[in-house]
Image (cartoon, coloured by chain):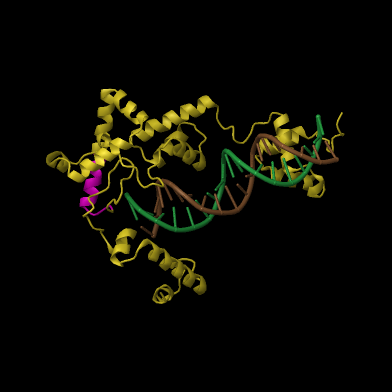
Chain colours: A yellow, B green, C brown
Amino acid sequence: MGRPPKYDWDDKRDICYKLWVVDKLSTPNIVKWFAEHFKLPESEVPSVSQFHQKFRNWNFPGRRDKWTEEEYEKLTARTKELFEHYVTAGDIQKTLKEEGWDLNDYDFRALRKKNGMLMRSMNGYKPLPSNKRPRTESDAVEGPTAEEEEQQQQSEDQATPEEDAQQTTLPPEEAARRAQRLAELQMQSDELLRTRKRRRRIRGYGPMPADDPSIGPRYGSETSLDECKAFLQLSNETYMELRDQFEAICREEGIIKMTLCADGQWQAAKDRL
DNA sequence: GGCTGAGTAATACGTGTTAA
DNA sequence: TTAACACGTATTACTCAGCC
């Protein structure tokens, strides 16, 4: 026999169900709601964790139980399928929504991160294994350069056993279909570069490899950070110092961002460096 | 057994960087 | 200039040890 309950929960189940499950209020907001509704100070209302405990006792669904394990596997498989067909992230998300998955931005991002379906990563752009990389016509004629061969070797070294297994078990017609799709993407990409309608790629992006490093930017404003540092003869350390200095100047001048500056204010800040 | 508060994990949102 | 992307941080959800 423990101490008697401090709160009378018996007639609160339905209203809690409505607030938590139907209205999807957060627990702090439910505490607030109870305080306002019963005209009590919040200190007189059960704590946030007490509400959580009650919800669990009442078998209310948790906010994290969005899908069953089986559903999640299905969703993952479908996302992988689209990703492997080089569908862009936005189109994958759109397709999944159209197929009825209740997928918000966070869910989508977490799913892709968990399953290694990101176009970019902290360690830079993941180079594509050469056998997945689209080849241009000139590649086909000239063959790989020494640098490309080295990249190819590195890429092969980095391929996971799962990737290798998947690659070798892909049905020939599926492999051909993907190769064709990649070739189309590469042709479009080459054409856009040739007509200066797209920037050069300084790193691989998704299935597309980086462009030839000897290609310069289209416009001055497209110079990469590394190129700027080299031009200004800045080491990473001096570059970071310079950034800190400029941040301090901007703070002093009350500058939030370049586009919100008064006429000449941005230039004046730069001149102080 | 009921309750609290601390700690951890999951989620949401804002921001900087880069490519289109 | 805009959109896509990844990351950092704040907020929220949840668990659990320990006290009453």
Is residue A53 visible from the viewing direction of this image?
yes
Q: Main secondary structure of the magenta part?
A: helix
Percent of width and height locating residue B17: 39, 56
Q: How many marks?
A: 0
Residue drawn where x is 48% and y is 27% of the image: A73
Percent of width and height locating residue A224: 32, 58
Quadrant (top left, top right, bottom left, bottom right) of the N terminus of chain A: top right
Extreme residue toward the left, this view? A141
> Quick one: A194 or B6, which is closer to the camera?
B6
Q: Is residue A234 left or right of residue A30?
A: left
Residue drawn where x is 40% and y is 45% of the image: A121
Q: On the image, which quarter does residue A179 sit in?
A: top left
> Quick one: A213 or A78, which is closer to the camera?
A213
Residue drawn where x is 44% and y is 35% of the image: A115
Is residue A224 visible from the viewing direction of this image?
no
Image vertical order of residue A131 relative to residue B12, above or below: above
Q: On the image, which quarter does residue A157 sit in?
A: top left
> For the magenta stretch, what is the residue range?
A184-198
Percent of width and height locating residue A26: 66, 43
Quadrant (top left, top right, bottom left, bottom right) of the C terminus of chain A: bottom left
Image vertical order of residue A212 relative to residue C1, above or below: above
Q: Is residue A2 left or right of residue A254?
A: right
Percent of width and height locating residue C5: 41, 46
Q: Is residue A164 magenta?
A: no
Image vertical order of residue A96 relative to residue A27, above or below: above
